[in-house]
Amino acid sequence: MVASTKKRSKNYSSARFGWICAGILVCFFLLMFRVGYLQLMEHQQLTNQADQRSVRTQVIPTNRAIITDRNNEALAVSVSSKDIVLDPKHIIDSQTNTDDARWQSMANVLKMPLADIQALIRHNARKRFVYLARKVEDENAAYIQKLHLTGVSSEQDFSRFYPMGQDAAGLIGIVGQDNQGLEGIELGFNHLLQGKNGLRVYQKDGSGAVINVLKNVDPVPPPNVTLSIDKFIQYVLFAQIRDGVIANQADSGCAVLVRVNTGEVLGMASYPSFNPNNYANTPSKDIRNVCSSDSFEPGSTVKPVVVMVGARSPSDPAGYRAGYHAVSG
């Protein structure tokens, strides 16, 4: 009886062991089949998903061309600056304390309420890239970098500076946040001034460190643009038109000084004007160049030109006298 029980127990254990081994083999073959399927059938899709997580493309901006007058005096130059960017998803996932004193220090440098920065992070919780501030001076950006804030970084950019300020604002124009011309020469010659940006494609690991550079294209800087304008004539011309508008309580005024022999424009000024280095709250009517954007009827202003041409013409000896003509009725 005891021997029979032991025999049945041994047979049961052997059968159970066999089923376990069979189950392990089935799972192994299913796993191998799945691996083979992913490798052969979905390889490209998985590769694309991996690239989306690890491969980044960075645009390397080039500085915008310098605009100079006829004597190579600068009228518009590009100054190095930085864009401060956030990674809201990383900030939230890492449970970063944005009430920390270092975050308040950054807010003070950027002249922004800390609550606005925190709201920006919350409202873009799933995004990996959000601009916090554009065109930040290099000194301020360096200070922010030294704070070592989680999810905060900077990118190279350029700001536009206009040495003549309002004296040539209407003529030279302005650029937007993306360094594209919006008015004046900056807009008209935008294709020459903007150059060609570079490109850097790289792969990074889970900690954000660059592990491989896949592609690197250097930026191509544009050539400088020289105008026929004379800087000092422009100063005088603007001062005269400004004083004339103010003295006569006019709505606006403009003046163009041309070298007659060549047709070169030596100066072009309009008033009211604006500060092109800080035009955020400037009315649109003050930004436009009245000389080139508005139309005027010549009226009596053209009569002196006609008289001048007549005075320079040779005299006609034919005589003229007053007479009369009888009309019937």
Image (cartoon, helix red, strand yellow):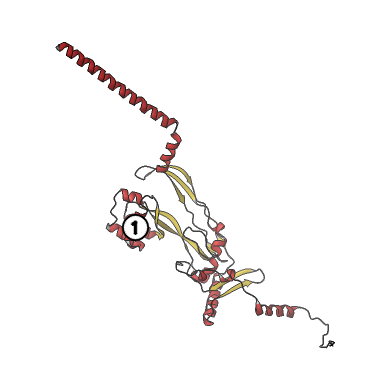
Q: Residue at x 53, y 56 (%)?
A: 194
Residue 120 position by quadrant: bottom left
Reply above or below: 321 against 45.
Answer: below
Direction from residue 21 to residue 172 in the image, left or right: right
* Residue at point 34%, 57% (across, down): 119
Q: Is mark 1 on a helix, strand or loop?
A: helix
Residue 246 relative to residue 39: left or right: right
Q: Which residue was labeled with disc 1?
A: 119
Position in image of residue 9 (x %, y %): 20, 16
Residue 53 falls in image quadrant: top left
> Considering only vertical position in the picture, is 283 above or below 45?
below
Q: In this view, does 287 lie above or below 199?
A: below
**Foreground residue among 85 and 295:** 295
Location of the C terminus (image quadrant): bottom right
Residue 143 x/y as whole percent: 34, 58
Decide: is 271 above or below 104. below
Query: In the displayed structure, does residue 68 sit left or right of residue 127?
Result: right
Residue at the front extreme?
1
Q: How many marks?
A: 1
Counting from the top left corner in percent of width and height, residue 77 is at: 49, 62
4 relative to 144 in the view: left or right? left
> Which residue: 33% across, 23% down?
25
Residue at 62% of width from left, 71% of height from top?
258
Q: Nearer the viewer, residue 49 or 200?
A: 49
Residue extending furthest toward the left: 2
